[in-house]
Image: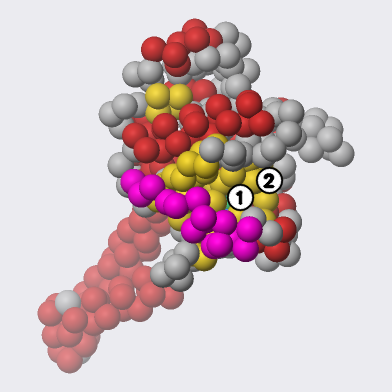
């Protein structure tokens, strides 16, 4: 991890000018910086003012957690830090120029396509698995669409580790429950309830958000919570009512989206131990189509039914041709008979029949 000279960061952001401000979070402001070698970076600087002390500890925590992680394609990459006696620590990370998933879903006028939504969900799940299976294990505690950012190739990465906890850290057991309303696991009520399943709950909310295009909490609707709204609809299999109405769901995507909604419902279940899956299980479910219960059940029945119908038709046709063959033999029509007995005519007719019913 690089140690940046504070003056270089000042110059790279035109003295932290408002023109370079990307946005403000709860524990700092993020600026776009252009380093001497023209490399583009994002620089997080604690906010000044009465909340500065709190901001500083969150920023320190973010630096501590990010610097303990190996590089991962779906987790924001920490490039380095800088220290200034007056301004404290600054965090330098890769620049994510395409904004957040929150903006893509709720601000942009071009909502993502259905395959893109599935890709985003899969990439976030991979990021969470990396954190949960890593050494040390990390619980993010603030998985939400505003913390999922897009790089120049529109790949998603999980960012904002201000609330994250390292499970090996003895302090982690005493952290007070924290997160964002709407994404926060209702089972996480005391410090001792901290677990990876808290992140799974938040991931489930993000899945619902990705599929519906609805905000986690929307005060203009009843119910305002996406979980309360979506779960009864999923149970009643009213899938089309959940899907983002701004973009038509193609038929070929329906089984996948139905399957993803079933995963989301399990993620937000209050039965943490038996129903809520681990993120490893979520990825297995997402990546292995054989476990796509909904996806498999209907096509298998459909194709079995279709095969039975075709088999019946073939048998009928075969017996018709058999009858014609007998008649031709009786009448001495050897031309027709030779074709029929060699099976060529039979095969041709059967194929034509099958094709006409495809
Ligand atoms: N690496 C980055 N590249 C580009 N933009 C970023 C980067 N990191 C953060 N941002 C943007 O900077 C703003 C502030 O981010 P930050 O992570 O501090 O807070 P937040 O996620 O918005 O809020 P909170 O900390 O309250 O959860 C957000 O608009 C975010 O999208």
Q: Are marks 1 and 2 in contact (CB under 8 Å)?
A: yes
Question: Does the beta carbon of the residue at mark 2 sit less than 8 Å from ligand 1?
Answer: yes
Tell whether 198 sits left or right of 301. right
Residue 340, x across and y down, in percent = 19, 80
Q: Label 1 to label 2, Cα distance in Å? A: 6 Å
Q: Is residue 36 left or right of residue 107?
A: left
Disc 1 Cβ-to-ligand 1 distance below 8 Å: yes
- What x and y, as percent, mark residue 42? 53, 55
Q: Position of residue 239 (x, y in %)?
A: 64, 44
Residue 296 position (above or below residue 172): below
Residue at point 37% right, 30% down? 132
Residue occupying image coordinates x 34% and y 34% = 68
Query: Compared to 330, does 305 lie above or below?
Result: above
Q: Is residue 2 magenta?
A: yes
Give the mark count. Answer: 2
> In the drawing, what numbered circle is on residue 24?
2
Tag 2 secondary structure: strand
| Residue 246 in the image: above or below residue 300 | below
Q: Residues within 10 Å of mark 1 (few under 14, many from 20)?
A: many
Would you identify the image quadrant in which residue 59 lies? Answer: top right
Q: Is residue 82 above or below residue 329?
A: above
Q: Is residue 132 visible?
A: yes
**Residue 169 or 356: which is nearer the viewer?**
169
**Mark 1 = which residue?**
30
């Amino acid at each position: 991890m690089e140690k940046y000279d504070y003056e270089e960061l000042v110059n790279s952001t035109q003295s932290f000018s408002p023109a370079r401000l990307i946005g403000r979070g709860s524990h700092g402001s993020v600026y776009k910086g252009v380093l001497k070698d023209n490399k583009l970076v994002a620089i997080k600087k604690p906010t000044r003012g009465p909340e500065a002390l709190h901001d500083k500890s969150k920023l320190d925590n973010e630096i501590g957690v990010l610097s303990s992680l190996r590089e991962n394609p779906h987790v924001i990459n920490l490039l380095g830090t800088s220290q200034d006696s007056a301004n404290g620590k600054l965090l330098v990370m890769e620049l994510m120029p395409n904004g957040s998933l929150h903006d893509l879903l709720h601000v942009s006028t071009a909502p993502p396509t259905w395959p893109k939504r599935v890709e985003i969900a899969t990439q976030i799940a991979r990021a969470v698995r990396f954190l949960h299976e890593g050494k040390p294990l990390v619980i993010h505690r603030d998985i939400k669409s505003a913390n999922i950012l897009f790089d120049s190739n529109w790949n998603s990465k999980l960012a904002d580790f201000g609330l994250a906890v390292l499970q090996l850290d003895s302090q982690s057991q005493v952290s007070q429950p924290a997160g964002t309303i709407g994404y926060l696991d209702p089972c996480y009520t005391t410090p001792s309830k901290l677990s990876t399943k808290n992140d799974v709950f938040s991931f489930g909310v993000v899945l619902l958000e990705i599929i519906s295009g609805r905000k986690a909490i929307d005060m203009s609707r009843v119910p305002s919570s996406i979980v309360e709204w979506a779960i009864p609809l999923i149970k009643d299999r009213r899938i089309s009512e959940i899907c983002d109405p701004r973009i038509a769901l193609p038929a070929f995507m329906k089984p996948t989206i139905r399957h993803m909604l079933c995963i989301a419902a399990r993620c937000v279940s209050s039965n943490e131990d038996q129903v809520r899956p681990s993120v490893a299980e979520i990825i297995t479910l997402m990546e292995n189509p054989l476990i796509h219960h909904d996806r498999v059940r209907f096509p298998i029945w459909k194709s079995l039914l279709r095969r039975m119908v075709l088999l019946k038709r073939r048998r009928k046709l075969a017996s018709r041709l058999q009858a014609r063959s007998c008649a031709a033999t009786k009448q001495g029509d050897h031309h027709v008979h030779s074709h029929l007995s060699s099976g060529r005519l039979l095969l041709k007719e059967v194929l034509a029949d099958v094709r006409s019913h495809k």
